[in-house]
Image (tube, rainbow, N blue to C red):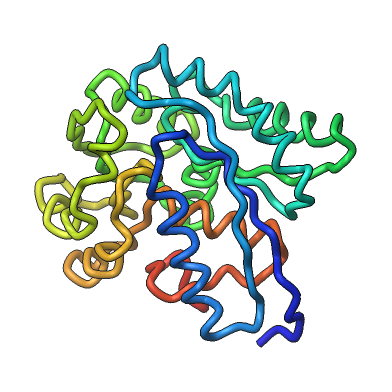
Amino acid sequence: MTSNNSYRRIGLIVPSSNVTMETEIPALLRAREAIFSDRFTFHASRMRMKNVSKEELERMDDDSLRCAAELSDAAVEVQAYACLVAIMSRGMGYHKVSQQRLYDATVANGLPTPIVSSAGALVDSLHAMGAKKVSIICPYMKPLTRMVVDYIESEGIEVQDFMALEIPNNLDVAAQDPNAPAELWRKLDVTGIDAIVASACVQMPSLPAIENIEKASGIPTISAAVATTYEILKTLNLEPVAPGGGFLLTQR
């Protein structure tokens, strides 16, 4: 166990209609508090977005710099950008561009803050797991889902199969049963894959399903929220372990 009992401040850059980012990531880190002495507080700034369309996502993403500056006012230790599809719909490799822009905004505000994004976290976590081939579940409309698939593949990870639930309204995405992915994955072709992405979206809840899928499939399973939690912990130089987070967040 660590001996530092001070609170670690985590900033969350959140779409205004997102209600899951501030639920699942804190749930994982609260579970971690049961086995480590590290404690966390969470501080959010919101960007306007109601419907998951490319045009609305672009307008929202343009507002993210304001959020980064606001959160740096609170001297948070890391900021996590919470909309995977907003990043992946803006072009290949954009998570690196976005993270640099957001970091630069904190530098300009006089309080430089490390930035992670759910998009970058998903890709980086799959690489950390050694995953070369995956199957994924997305809540998005098919054109946006195809952008996500193409983006992941552009990062060197083959997407063998994907499911698009085609839910355009972001609150409707959050209203999905968090246990549903525990059955939805069975509709995917998982032959020979290295990992299942139970939710390629931090708004679509899936946390209770992660370890159930792993047990039923025998395949390491992650979500955008699990991956973002992993990257937050790594950025804070803390052991990336949290009960309930499946293979990625299991103590080796």
- Residue name at image x 72 percent, y 31 percent: 100
Q: Nearer the viewer, residue 115 or 248?
A: 115
Residue sitting at x 52%, y 58%: 229
Residue 127 in picture, x, y percent from top left: 51, 49
Front-most of residues 43 and 193: 43
In the rendered image of this protein, does residue 217 appear above or below residue 243? above
Could you tell me residue 195's position as x and y percent? 33, 54
Q: Nearer the viewer, residue 251 or 224?
A: 224
Q: Quadrant of residue 246?
A: bottom left
Quadrant holding the N terminus: bottom right
Residue 120 appears at what percent x and percent y?
Answer: 55, 40
x then y, percent, for residue 178: 23, 56
Is 104 displayed left or right of 217 in the figure? Answer: right
Horizontal side of residue 18 vs 10, given as left or right:
left
Residue at 48% x, 26% y: name it.
48
Q: Residue at x 30, y 45 (%)?
A: 204
